[in-house]
Amino acid sequence: MSSHRQDAVRRIAAPDIAARKGGTPIVCLTAYTAPMAEILDEYCDLLLVGDSLGMVIHGLPNTVGVTLEMMILHGQAVMRASKRAMVVVDMPFGSYEGSPHEAYANATRIMKETGCSAVKVEAGPAVADNIDYMVKRGIPVMGHVGLRPQAVMVDGGFKAKGRVGAERQQILDEARAAADAGAFCVVVEGVAEGLAREITQAIAAPTIGIGASVGCDGQILVTDDMLGLFDWTPKFVRRYADLRGEIGGAVGRYAEDVRQRRFPGPAEIYFAKAG
Ligand code: KIV
């Protein structure tokens, strides 16, 4: 049997995303679980197993406590349930900043154990060399600039970025450095609208906006935010559903049926077979 078995559906790959610069906007969402990945796969070009899963799924206060093992477990679930979308797994805080070798070792572990197509790193000032090292050794890397959630402790919170001159230049430089180091696309999060457009024009890699600008080459949101699973969401989230209300309503009806002995009904129980 050939070792080059062709899958029935070809997964979107890093060069496909890179080639979309300036074209039809790239549709991205986060995915952390198999059932959600299965639903999103049909509609999205790229599924990000974001380290936001620490807050969204595990109830952590921020992403600092997320581990490689958590990312791998959720990455495996998303890969099992998706066929078409490119799956990118976030490298958690502390797994890629220290040195190019450490970044490479952890990225290869994520790729081998999940089967994902790329990793994402928050591309602060010290990370471009590590991106370069990984890309040159066969790892597609997505960058992430602007509001970098893993920098929450130095920033003192999740704050929009690039609204003043010096910070603006710094973010532009970081985006350029990530793209020049070979990132196949760059997430631009929580920055002033004009800056997101400037970054999009300045770099050859597609930009994926979140709280950025419609001028970016694609958009991403945290799926649970856009589905309305939380009471509070950042200003940049558009809610396309009210799943929190839907779930509350459904669970309330179930609770009432149980208390009133209306559940289970005849259609929902087993009867003994004759004989
Ligand atoms: O972790 C995450 O979900 C992200 C996206 C919001 C871009 O980094």
Image: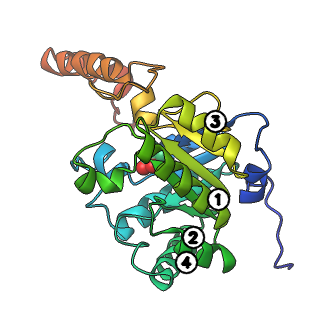
**Amino acid at pointer 4:** Thr
Secondary structure beneath dot 4 equals: helix
Query: Which residue appears at 50% of the width and 62% of the height?
Result: 76
In space, the residues marked 2 and 4 are separated at their CA atoms by: 13 Å
Which residue does the numbered mark 4 point to in the structure image? Answer: 108
- Snapshot colouring: rainbow
**Amino acid at pointer 1:** Ala
Query: Which residue appears at 33% of the width and 28% of the height?
Result: 233
Which residue does the numbered mark 3 point to in the structure image? Answer: 216
Residue furthest to the bottom in view is: 101
From the viewer's perspective, is 107 left or right of 51? right
Q: Position of residue 177 (x, y in %)?
A: 59, 62
**Amino acid at pointer 3:** Cys
**Mark 4: few, some, or many residues within 10 Å (few <14, many ≥20)?**
some
Secondary structure beneath dot 3 equals: loop
Closer to the chain start, of discs 3 and 2, is 2
Secondary structure beneath dot 1 equals: helix
